[in-house]
Amino acid sequence: MILAGTDTSAGTLEWAMSNLLNHPEVLKKAKTEIDEKIGLDRLIEEQDIVKLPYLQNIMSETLRLYPVAPMLLPHLASEDCMVAGYDVPRGAILLVNVWAIHRDPDMWEEPEKFKPERFEKEGEDKKLMSFGIGRRACPGSGLAQRLVTLALGSLVQCFEWERV
Ligand code: HEM
């Protein structure tokens, strides 16, 4: 549980910061959103996250391009079954290449581009699989999303960042 929750969250935060440093226009937009919605007199808190859609979109775009578990965890078929027309025998191990799915040009416009604005489109976030899907999906996804978004927002709010 400690391993599943710490390295994953830290890695995602690191990717998010790296994306912001490489896209100063996105960083500027995130800072403006925080300054306008939170003000300059207090620190960002967890309850503020709902008021910061652009910051949430940065998180989604980071999770899309850099899923920390790019192949999820191996899944084992407990029974013979058929998935999308393919026979999957009992005992087969299935790996899901989320990294490739998240960069599939049939599913995403300009998939290689870091563009948080894409998530302004209704339902776009439903295509993300960074936490897996179904009953073995990550049980910590809600916590992780709040925690990493808050940490990212705090870093953006409290420091001036630039690439050197
Ligand atoms: C950005 C942060 C995180 C990401 C991207 C992430 C992603 C994932 C993924 C992809 C899986 C496997 C799902 C599958 O194979 O279908 C998983 C499983 C799991 N995660 Fe997370 N996770 C994160 C944070 C956390 C946190 C904060 C916790 C707990 C505090 C946590 C606890 C777990 C546990 C216990 C499992 C195993 C679930 C099972 O096998 O049924 N994760 N996570």
Image (spheres, grey):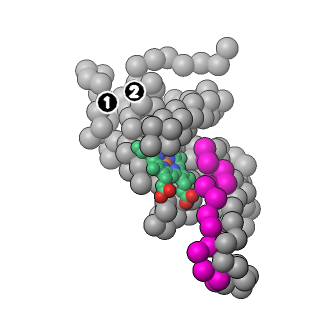
Determine whether 58 is above or below 25 in the image: below
Place residue 102 in its image quadrant: bottom right
Q: Give the Cα separation between the discs numbered 1 and 2.
A: 6 Å
Q: Label 1 amino acid?
A: Ile
Question: Residue 98 colored magenta?
Answer: no
Identify which residue is drawn at 39% across, 38% down: 147
Q: Is residue 164 left or right of residue 33?
A: right
Q: Please name the predominant secondary structure of the magenta segment in the image.
A: loop
Place residue 148 in its image quadrant: top left
Q: Is residue 162 visible?
A: yes
Residue under circle 1? 44
- Range shown magenta: 67-81
Q: Label 2 amino acid?
A: Ser
Q: Relative to the observer, which residue lies in front, 130 or 22?
A: 130
Residue under circle 2? 154
Number of callouts: 2
**SS of the residue under disc 2:** helix
Q: Position of residue 7 (x, y in %)?
A: 54, 35
Identify which residue is drawn at 64% across, 59% down: 74
The 10 Å Cα crowd at callout 2, few under 14, some 14 to 19, many 20 or more, is some
Q: Which mark identifies residue 62?
A: none
Q: Position of residue 84 (x, y in %)?
A: 68, 81
Q: Quadrant of the C terminus?
A: top right
Q: Is residue 52 left or right of residue 134?
A: left
Identify which residue is drawn at 57% across, 30% down: 14
